[in-house]
Amino acid sequence: MQASSVRRSDTLMCYQGGGYDGCLWEWNFGVWDHAGEWHSIIASGCDGCKTEAEALKYIDDEDTRRTGNEYYLHDLTLAEDVKDFATAYHSGLTVIVADAVNKLYPEPVLYWICADCGQHFHYAHPGVFPAGGWSGDGGISVSPKHVVCDECLELGSCCICGEYEGVETLIAGVCEYHWERALAEAPQQAAELEEIEAVIDAGTTQLKTLCTLVPPFAVKYRQQHRASMEALGIKCCELQRQVVDAYSD
């Protein structure tokens, strides 16, 4: 593509900038806003484009690029391009870039996605938290592949130590470390929980066997099994809460 053919309004440019000793490149970002004004969002190393002239030169002349040679132009007026931006790069970068670009517009044009709830957010929240998957973003810098919103950070953090583990990982609101410690202090509940787990395992095995041997009654057996498992699940949650409450006190 020639620089002369670049749409210089509502266009986000993502390119391989960076370039330091011992580093090839890292993702850089700049944007032409609705009025056609260039704004550098991230410009690092020898190929960072801080001005519009540098950005156009980067696009126009491959020989001037001293590090990487790839760039992408996202049309901010196209939903497909906006989605590509939200999913193609590390979330740690999309949060920074979306927040900076959206502040240039009366209404937000970019979004980032919470790794837990999947909702779209437009600005960087005070509690935005890296949810793991740290890796290099092309050069010497690293960024998280996944981030979570304020609400999911609160829901997914251990209520005792405050460490983020994710909602699906917590047991009665606490991390595995504190759950094991709490369980050790509640032998009676621990024994009851072990019995419930044994009943659940036996019931699941029995259901599979009955559904195989007596197919006509499979639906009935499944309904009975589901009802039994729901009751046991409620009992299990009550016991887990008792364990954690006693430990917290």
Image: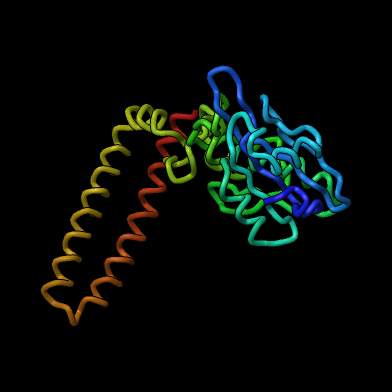
Q: Residue at x 49, y 29 (%)?
A: 248
User: Who is closer to the viewer here, 214 or 153?
Assistant: 153
Q: Residue furthest bottom?
A: 216
The image quarter in which residue 64 lies: top right
| Quarter residue 209 falls in | bottom left
Q: Is residue 113 visible?
A: yes
Q: Position of residue 48 (x, y in %)?
A: 70, 31
The answer, for residue 108, to whether it is visible in the render is no
Q: Residue at x 55, y 27 (%)?
A: 24
Residue in front for this viewpoint, 191 or 125: 125
Q: Is residue 109 left or right of residue 149?
A: right
52 or 218: which is nearer to us? 52
Which image quarter: residue 20? top right
Q: In this figure, what is the number of numbered marks?
A: 0
Residue 7, horizontal then vertical, whole percent: 77, 54
- Residue drawn at x 39%, y 33% as measured from the top left: 176
Q: Nearer the viewer, residue 196 or 249?
A: 196
Residue 173 image point, x, y percent: 48, 39
Q: Residue at x 74, y 48 (%)?
A: 3
